Amino acid sequence: MGKQPPVPLLVNGRRSDGRLPTEHRPVRMEVGVVSNAEGSALVAYGNTVILAAVYGPREVPQKHLELPDKAILRVRYHMAPFSTSEGRKSPTPTRREIEISKVIRTALEPVVLLERFPRTTIDIYIEVLQADGSTRVTGITAASLALADAGIPMRDLLVGVSIGKVSGTIVVDLNQLEDQYGEGDMPLAIMYSRGLITLMQADGEWMPNEINQAIDLAFKVAEKIYRLEKETLKGRYVESAITI
Amino acid sequence: MLSVTQERSVIPRLKQEIMRKMVEQGVRIDGRGLNDYRKLMIRVNAIKTADGSSIVALGNTKVIAGVKVDVGKPFEDTPDEGALIVNLEIAPTASPDVEPGPPDENAIEIARVVDRAIRHSGFIDFKSLSIVTGKHAWFLWVDIYVINHDGNLIDASTIAAVTALMNTTLPKVELDPTGNIIKIDRSVRAQLTTNPEKLPLTITHVKMGNVLLVDPTREEEDLSDGMYVVGVAGGNIVAIQKVIGAFTRDEVNYVINNSVNQYLRLRDAVLNALKNPSTELRL
């Protein structure tokens, strides 16, 4: 609102970092990066780097929270104090982090077969190590990989993708600058092989037909990330077979 | 702070079956159709101590929004704009399962969705809140109190917040020639400018099986397989929040289009309720 970006967000069809509107930043994935965790993953979308670790299914420390017919998920999305480009981010959870933890939890709940592990908790910790926009969706991809790496039964892999609007154009995978100065922001989590959306938020101003366009683009990009997720998970076993 | 899977209230199986069967035939257990809102009553400025307020009853859900205005220093990246801060508390009066304490993730989520719907709508011209560029601007503090929880807190809260803002007045500020504040005269007031063409409202859908319905009661929320909120202002979408569950692309399309349609009905209901202030709503 009234905020002017320090550099133009779109010039001759190219974005501030040289990408095309439908171009995703390079995606990097690695699983099994925390030896103590049941499952873990490190995922980067460009300069956004997120670590996710999964513990459980295990006993619920606060007995009154356990459910008789299924496992509970306990999720924390958290930004490291050194992860932002501005000053130090206080480690105390902000309202933003509390909301994001909740929407990520409800994005993961339809994916995990919670009914297999009654009276237990599956804990998912998402740490933003370096933030350059799209942190919640990168975190979702990392959490999904960490859950799969932990061997927890899932209905599908989840892919996090962000869509945005800059200078009237629908773009994919917002960086920090576009997130801050763009006209709209729409993070999505997609169960790709099932065609289901488990996280969808939006702010800014959107015309109803733009939303359809945005979802189209998100599914197109999600396919590629989904394939990379599968390869990454398979790769782990190929690697261990070689080292034996 | 961990976000933890929440327990849902138990609804007797017989009632569950009846509710699910009925919605498949397009009727709800309280007699409403799938796109019908409950009775809406609004009473504005009943709170004399606030700079603007609104009590909203949506069926048995009851919320109060109170606006307090303050002069603050504008943010560095928007030196010629004021600010909007939305907070929400689910009072322990609201239902037997609410424990007193600071706002939990549910309260924070609702407040942030309402905030986004208002912020991006153009309903408030933030530049009109500037007093002296870079120095003084109005801060609008909107505090929403849920007094009784019978479902659809988000839509009721948005209605309360926007109708309170429509009835908010700003005190007169006297400045010296250098732009310092001499006096804030709370007895002389001017109406806060809002743009009724861009009135922001949220429309909440829940999914029961394959059926989507608006304005859920608490019971319908507890039984639902999904919840999806769309903020609409004029003809534009200004906020989206999937709250619970998984949605197909067709379902999302239906919900977006239906929200744009239902917005017109809900806006009429709000404007009507404002024209006919309720005498039933007491403090």
Image (tube, helix red, strand yellow):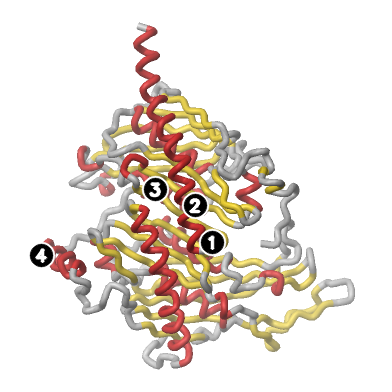
Q: Residues within 10 Å of mark 2 (few under 14, many from 20)?
A: many
Q: Is residue B264 above or below residue B242?
A: below
Q: Amino acid at mark 1?
A: Trp
Q: Which mark is residue B3?
A: 3
Is residue B142 rendered to the left or right of residue A107? Answer: right
Which of pointers 3 and 1 indicates the residue nearer the eye? Answer: 1
Marks 1 and 2, how far apart at CA: 10 Å
Residue occupied by mark 2: A214
- Is A22 or A49 nearer to us in this picture? A22
Q: Which residue is mark 1?
A: A206
Q: Between residues A60 and A201, which one lies in front from this camera angle?
A: A201
* Residue A29 image position (x, y, % from top left): 48, 28
Give, as a three-letter code, the residue at label 4: Leu
In percent of width and height, residue A18 lies at: 67, 38
Same chain shared by disc 1 and disc 4: no
Q: Nearer the viewer, mark 3 or mark 2?
A: 2
Label 3, residues with CA under 10 Å away: few <14, some 14-19, many ≥20: many
Using the numbered discs, state the Cα–Cα distance from disc 3 to disc 4 in whole angstroms.
Answer: 32 Å
Asked if A97 appears above or below B238 in the picture, the reply is: above
Residue B227 vs residue A163, the one in the foreground: A163
Q: Nearer the viewer, residue A43 or B234?
A: B234
Screen quadrant of the C terminus of chain B = bottom left
- Residue B166 appears in the figure: yes
Where B223 falls versus A217 (above or below)?
below
Residue A11 drawn at (x, y percent)? 71, 47
Q: CA distance from mark 3 to mark 2?
A: 28 Å
Q: Position of residue A58 (x, y in %)?
A: 28, 34
Q: CA distance from mark 3 to mark 1?
A: 29 Å
